[in-house]
Image (spheres, rainbow, N blue to C red):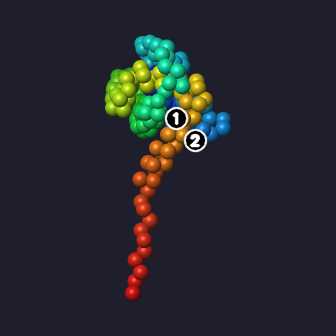
Amino acid sequence: MRKLTFLVGLGLSFGALTVWAQGSKGSTPIPSPTATATPARGAAPSPQVSPSLTAAQVTDAQVEQLARILLELDPLIREASAQLRETQSEAEYEKIMQRTEAQASRIVEKQGLTVAKYRELMTLANEDPTLNQRVRVRLQELLQQKRSSASPQAATPTPTP
């Protein structure tokens, strides 16, 4: 099966967000953006990221940006994965990849980060247990907020005379 080199480089594996956020025992971390992935035909592997930041220097605002990006990338990755599993055409595969990569980059940049900075933060989050926990906690909070806002509020029954 082909892998989404760029998207794995962004730090997401398919369907792993909720498991990762919950920090379940036995769950693996989100793949490091420096991990070697099988490139698409003719594509070069993603370059290694050299962090210029230490985990202790990551601000709460950056943790927030990272968590929001992960939350937004999850459905994009799931959709792209499903489409890629179904495609038989190399041309369609490349089209899906290009579209997904562009959308992923826009999501990252919309949160105020460059793709390179996002990769750097993901590397640190996967390597440093304290930063990893900070991101997990914030991601859990965002997931809970999302669930709460999506679930209908229980209607208060109106007494009948």
State the residue in front, 98 or 53. 53
| Nearer to me, 117 or 79 | 117
Q: Residue furthest bottom?
A: 161
- Residue type of the residue flagged with mark 2: Gln
Q: Secondary structure at mark 1?
A: helix
Quadrant of the rendered structure where residue 156 is? bottom left
Pointer 2 residue:
22
In the rendered view, would you say 69 is above or below 35? Answer: below
Q: Nearer the viewer, residue 63 or 91?
A: 63
| Rendering coords of residue 19 (x, y %) | 56, 39
The part of the image, by quadrant, that contains residue 70 is top left
Label 2 neighbour load within 10 Å: few <14, some 14-19, many 20+: some
Q: Looking at this rendering, what residue extends furthest in the right direction?
A: 26
Q: Is residue 141 above or below residue 4?
A: below
Q: Is residue 146 above or below residue 90?
A: below
Q: Position of residue 129 (x, y in %)?
A: 60, 29
Residue 24, percent from left and from top: 62, 39
The answer to which of 129 and 119 lies nearer the viewer is 129
Residue at image coords 46%, 23%: 119
Identify the residue at horizontal 66%, vertical 35% (top origin): 26
| Residue 82 at least partly seen | no
Is tag 2's residue or tag 1's residue first in the polypeptide sequence? 2
Question: Which label was assigned to residue 146?
Answer: none
76 horizontally vs 28: left or right: left
Circle 1 residue: 135
